[in-house]
Amino acid sequence: QLQLQESGPGLVKPSETLSLTCAVSGGSISISNYYWGWIRQPPGKGLEWIGSFYYSGSTTYYNPSLKSRVTISVDTSKKQFFLKLTSVTAADTAVYYCVRRVDFWSGYPTWGQGILVTVSS
Amino acid sequence: EIVLTQSPATLSLSPGERATLSCRASQSVGSHLAWYQQKAGQAPRLLIYDASNRATGIPARFSGSGSGTDFTLTISSLQPEDFAVYYCQQRTNWPITFGQGTRLEIK
């Protein structure tokens, strides 16, 4: 059964770069028909999609609200993918989830447990 | 960007009652709509995908309906474990968007 696990610093200073890793177990990233990505949730608030990549098409999609600051990349040999968010502010404080869905289905059945990242000096 | 509006914001019901949650899209999403349940401190759990298909392991008391711009999640007989926050999500157009959530609380 596929599992996702986020890791990274729990505290980032304002103006610095948030960097997270999602480790994939029980499956491969380099297979067709799946979107992999990141979703975040500020404390007490709703869900915000950050971005996704489609390995088969080597295409990455980003939320326009974050596009100038976000990069999603992948290392298939390590079965990991990554999130980088630059110039963070307190508004970027959130639980960050890595996720996967089948490309022709609407929902995300697979989520990591989430990692809380706090932006504070 | 497609905006999803969920109503009501909060729904207060008793165990055994029927719950009806609504999600309205700012433009047609076809049937590309999903529903999630989220409990405190947990990741969201996919309940319904493609508007009306139950995800693996989801009890039959959960059902989804609708197409185009109007969607409904129905819980036929509320169990104590069903009180949580529910979100809808569309994938028709980038960016993927979520509704703001409906909190289902015990009356």
Image (cartoon, rainbow, N blue to C red):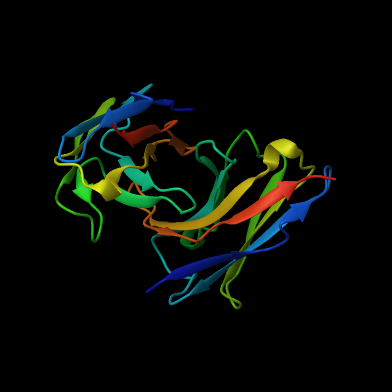
Q: How many marks?
A: 0
The quarter of the image holding the N terminus of chain A is: bottom left
The answer to whether residue B48 shows anywhere in this view is no
| Percent of width and height locating residue A116 | 63, 53
| Percent of width and height locating residue A43 | 59, 41
Q: Residue at x 34, y 46 (%)?
A: A106
Residue extending farthest to the front is B107
Tell whether A49 sits left or right of B52.
right
Tell whether B13 sits left or right of B93.
left
| Percent of width and height locating residue A97 | 54, 54
Q: Residue at x 85, y 45 (%)?
A: A121
Tell whether B36 sits left or right of B60.
right
Q: Residue at x 63, y 33 (%)?
A: A65
The answer to whether residue B94 shows anywhere in this view is yes
Pick the front one: A109 or A72: A109
Pick the front one: B29 or A86: A86
In which quarter of the view is residue B65 placed?
top left
| Percent of width and height locating residue A24 | 52, 71
Pick the front one: A104 or A2: A2
